[in-house]
Image (cartoon, rainbow, N blue to C red):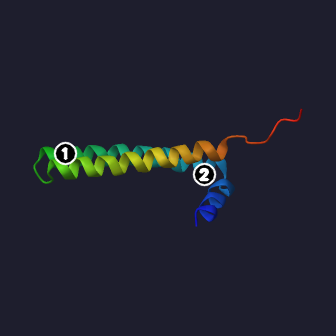
């Protein structure tokens, strides 16, 4: 399963990956603001605030890291 996901990510065009990473980061920030607004207004409690914040952070960091790895040149240099 992970090999298939890695293969799809590596074969995705760099411009498309970069665009998706930027969209993901922007939407994660927007969702975090909404999350805090819901907490301040009393709709969600502190545990939900922490959980949603962790999930959003994990999602943004994981995809951005995967994009960085996928765009890194891993070819060995000739001696």
Mark 1 nearby-residue class (10 Å; few <14, some 14–19, many ≥20): some
49 relative position to 64: left or right: left
Q: Residue 66: percent from the left, percent from the top?
A: 56, 48
* Circle 1 residue: 37
Q: Residue furthest right?
A: 79
Report the disc number at residue 16. Answer: 2
The CA span between labels 1 and 2 is: 31 Å
Q: Point out residue 60 in the picture as x, y percentages from the top left corner.
A: 44, 46
The quarter of the rendered structure image containing the N terminus is bottom right
What is the total number of numbered labels drawn onto the structure image?
A: 2
Q: What element carries label 1?
A: helix
Query: Residue 34's x, y, as percent?
Result: 25, 48
User: Which sits earlier in the primary sequence, circle 1 or circle 2?
Assistant: 2
Is 60 left, or right, of 48 in this rendering? right
Q: In which quarter of the image is the C terminus?
A: top right
Q: Identify the residue at horizontal 67%, vertical 52% (top origin).
A: 13
């Amino acid at each position: 399963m992970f090999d298939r996901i890695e293969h799809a990510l590596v074969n995705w065009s760099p411009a498309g990956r970069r665009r998706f990473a930027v969209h993901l980061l922007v939407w994660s920030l927007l969702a975090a603001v909404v999350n805090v607004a819901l907490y301040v207004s009393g709709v969600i409690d502190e545990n939900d605030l922490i959980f949603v914040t962790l999930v959003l952070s994990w999602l943004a960091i994981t995809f951005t890291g995967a994009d960085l790895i996928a765009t890194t040149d891993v070819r060995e240099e000739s001696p």
